[in-house]
Amino acid sequence: MTLQRENGSIIKTLFSLWVLCFFTGMIFHFRAVSSISTGLLLITGLACYKKKAVSLLFRSSLSPFLISCLLYFLYTVINLLLKDNTTVMRSQLEMKSALVLVPVAVSFTGFVGSKQLKRLMQYFVLLLLAACLYCLLIDVNTWIRTGQETIFFYHDLVSPLNQHAVFFSFLLFFSLVYILEYGTGFNFLPGKKLDGILTVFFSLILVLLASKLILFCWVVYLVYYFLKNKTGKKKLGWLLLLLVPLLLIAFTKNPVSNRFREIVQTDWASLDREQFDEADYLNGLQFRYLQWKLVPTILSEKQAWLTGLGEEKGKAGLQDQFIQRHLYQGQPGTDDLGYLAYNTHNQLLQSMLTGGLVAVLLFLMICGSLLYLAVKEKKTLITMTVISLLLFSGTESCFETQYGLVFFSFLPVFALILSKHLSSRTTTEPLPAIQ
């Protein structure tokens, strides 16, 4: 009995170590660390929980999501074998395998127990805090030397980590919802004051990162949270403390509000023309709207609606459309490729372009499985994670980067595990584990 207990303790410690490495790689943008820790999680999980792994795949709430991801990956493999060269095929298979490997690997963390999960989330929050402080220190030093104020906003803010503003905003948003729903459990300060300080600080960083999508999700969640928990003046005070600064930023001129003002002032009529000038600037909304015209045009010209063009020909077809319309093509001899470096910035369109209607159907199955998960579990952390990811897939081709794939496959699975094992602030009895 003692030996079994010791073995179980060692296994849980290994799992916790791999998860901690995964968090570190994801937050600090160490891709190799994320990849290696995912492999170690998967190997350790399969070695220790073979039978439970089969049950997890076919009998749990995760089953529809895992099966949908597997089907999408298998179709991608077939499409790559038929339509792309060896180099493209290898890089795409290596990247898109994360769609299957990451959720299966992360699902094994459900076996470490609620106490260890709570501690892992404390590490997650602390790592995120350390990353934010590191970026701010580097940016302050840069500002002192150069006087450049834009260093504190959007991609520049997290450039010391070589991070992407939207991806880092996702980590902050996930952490914020977790803190308000479950609490960190830190007791350095009395009365959960540290949770309040972290909430305000992470909210400030979220504003500076200026991701329109994540800021929208955060405001929606805040309104929901305070309406659900409205009891007394303290709740109203916190709501005002968090929302008033957002309103002030929105209605004054600054780098954050400028990004929103740019969208409001979008000139839709200018997109009806067939030809552009290289000097023409398209904001994010205009560019994404244009993709809805270009992708169907490409598929009709190539007669490839059913199975798409594949990765290489799909990218070339999109670039041809940019060239034909005289959109900005960068500076020859430099790394600046202009619009030629862009994909469709919409996962549904990207699936349609490279994999046709079959890929679209499979991607919609993945989206449907996430909605099913949110509806079935009825947990706020899962619901907000799913909503933000689905909205994200409408603004980015999230399966076309390793980081996008990791986020899309990791966050909903981990949200489910946390929601199943941890008790919310208003819940007195622990929730059951994943069956």
Image: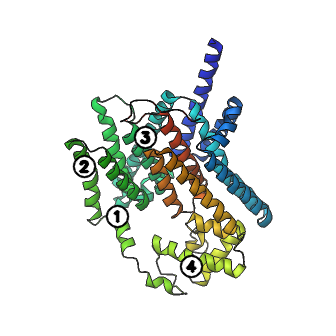
Say which amino acid is labelled 4: Lys
Q: How many marks?
A: 4
Disc 1 from disc 4: Cα separation: 30 Å
Say which amino acid is labelled 3: Ala
**Residue 77, relative to residue 332: is it above or below?**
above
Residue behind mark 2: 241
Q: Residue at x 36, y 58 (%)?
A: 146
The answer to the question of whether label 1 and label 2 lie on touching residues, with beta carbons closer than 8 A, is no
Q: Quadrant of the N terminus?
A: top right
Say which amino acid is labelled 2: Leu
Taking depth in this image into account, of 270 and 5 the one nearest to the observer is 5
Taking depth in this image into account, of 425 and 154 the one nearest to the observer is 425
- Residue 198 sits in quarter: top left
**Numbered mark located on residue 255 in the image:** 1
Q: Residue at x 23, y 47 (%)?
A: 236
Residue 171 in the image: x percent, y percent?
Answer: 47, 48
**Numbered mark located on residue 130 in the image:** 3
Would you say 405 lies left or right of 217 here? right
Taking depth in this image into account, of 27 and 266 the one nearest to the observer is 266
SS label for mark 3: helix
**Numbered mark located on residue 293 in the image:** 4
Name the N-terminal-most of marks 4 and 2.
Answer: 2
Would you say 360 lies left or right of 178 here? right
SS label for mark 4: helix
Q: Quadrant of the C terminus?
A: top right
Q: Badge 1: how crowded within 10 Å, few (<14), some, or many (20+)?
A: some
